[in-house]
Image: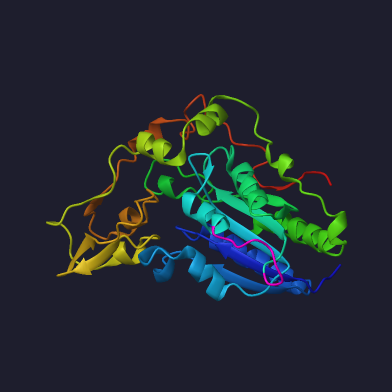
Amino acid sequence: MKTNIKVAIIVFSPSGHTLKAAKMMEKSMIDRGMQVQLLDITRNETVFRENKMAQYLEENVEPHDLICVGGPVYAGHFEGNAMKIIKALPYPDKKWGKLAVPFVTYGGLHTIIALTEAGDLFYRRKRINILGMKLGVFHTLTKKLAFRINENKPGKESFPVIEEFVERITKIANKKLSEIKDIRKSFNYTPFGPEKFGSKLFGQKLLRKIMFPKVVEINYDKCIGCGLCAERCPVNLYEMIDGKPQKTNFYFECICCAECYHNCPVGAISLDLKKPEHHHLSPESKHHKMESPQSAVYPKGV
């Protein structure tokens, strides 16, 4: 089945996994006749240096029928900067479509309330959630640990889920708007337990501080001034001044994505990664139980 609807896909992708998933979505959509615009706000100067998310969206998002916003899951939440995309959306009009789809990528054990948060934000911006999707991807924080979660994902294993996702979008988009119902309640699929209780009780910023009490630290004696840390920071916190990275952006906080840490060639950047290793992420932990299915489209079985 094909459709000629116009789709805008907007992502925040610190480690590139959400962007890779979005490109897979884009290809599948184009194959079905959709007109697709894909925007990646990661490291965008207007968004993160000038703190002008709404202006960037207004100036760059093209007219569309359906908008898809994607981001990673951080501490059980839809990542804060991905949330800001939805919060900054104008209400639907002739340019801004009424149909919406949130999607998340995650390398941890659970998505917990991430899709629910995104769906609720869309609803508040007067959108109709028609579907949602979660995809298991590589957990970047396990890159230098003794174990790695979902290494080399997303890959071929994601194709069937994305194909189902796009096919269902096609069927829904061919309906009359009056026949389309909001399905965000289907995003509440995580059973209530300690993780869900913690995510509901504590905000993303507080959970991040609990997991990473020490933020990124730079050893300037080791630093060789290559600039990779400043280049890889997804929220543009640093600039190279006199050959050294200096924090000059005070609109945004470190999101503990570890991109600077993993890309520093001389180990001049430190980030406390011991907690994830000794927490429930470790395969040796009694709490290590992956969400099942790891990747899926919601509502399921429709």
The span shown in magenta is 88-95
Q: Quadrant of residue 50?
A: bottom left
Residue displayed at 70% across by 71% down: 64
Is 107 left, or right, of 5 in this rendering?
left
Please say which color scheme the image uses: rainbow
Q: Quadrant of residue 37?
A: bottom right
Residue displayed at 80% across by 57% down: 168
Residue that extends furthest to the left in the rendered view of this protein: 221
Q: Quadrant of residue 23?
A: bottom right
Nearer-the-camera pick, 84 or 70: 84
Q: Position of residue 146 (x, y in %)?
A: 39, 40
Q: Position of residue 148 (x, y in %)?
A: 46, 44
Q: Judge whether residue 240 can be spotted in this image.
A: yes
Is 262 left, or right, of 62 in this rendering?
left
- Residue 90 is a magenta residue: yes
Is 105 left, or right, of 247 in this rendering?
right
Residue displayed at 81% across by 63% down: 173
Residue displayed at 53% across by 39% down: 76
Q: Judge whether residue 153 can be spotted in this image.
A: no
Q: Quadrant of the N terminus?
A: bottom right
Q: Position of residue 156 (x, y in %)?
A: 65, 59
Q: Position of residue 43 (x, y in %)?
A: 41, 66
- Residue 83 is a magenta residue: no
Nearer-the-camera pick, 38 or 265: 38
Nearer-the-camera pick, 81 or 162: 81
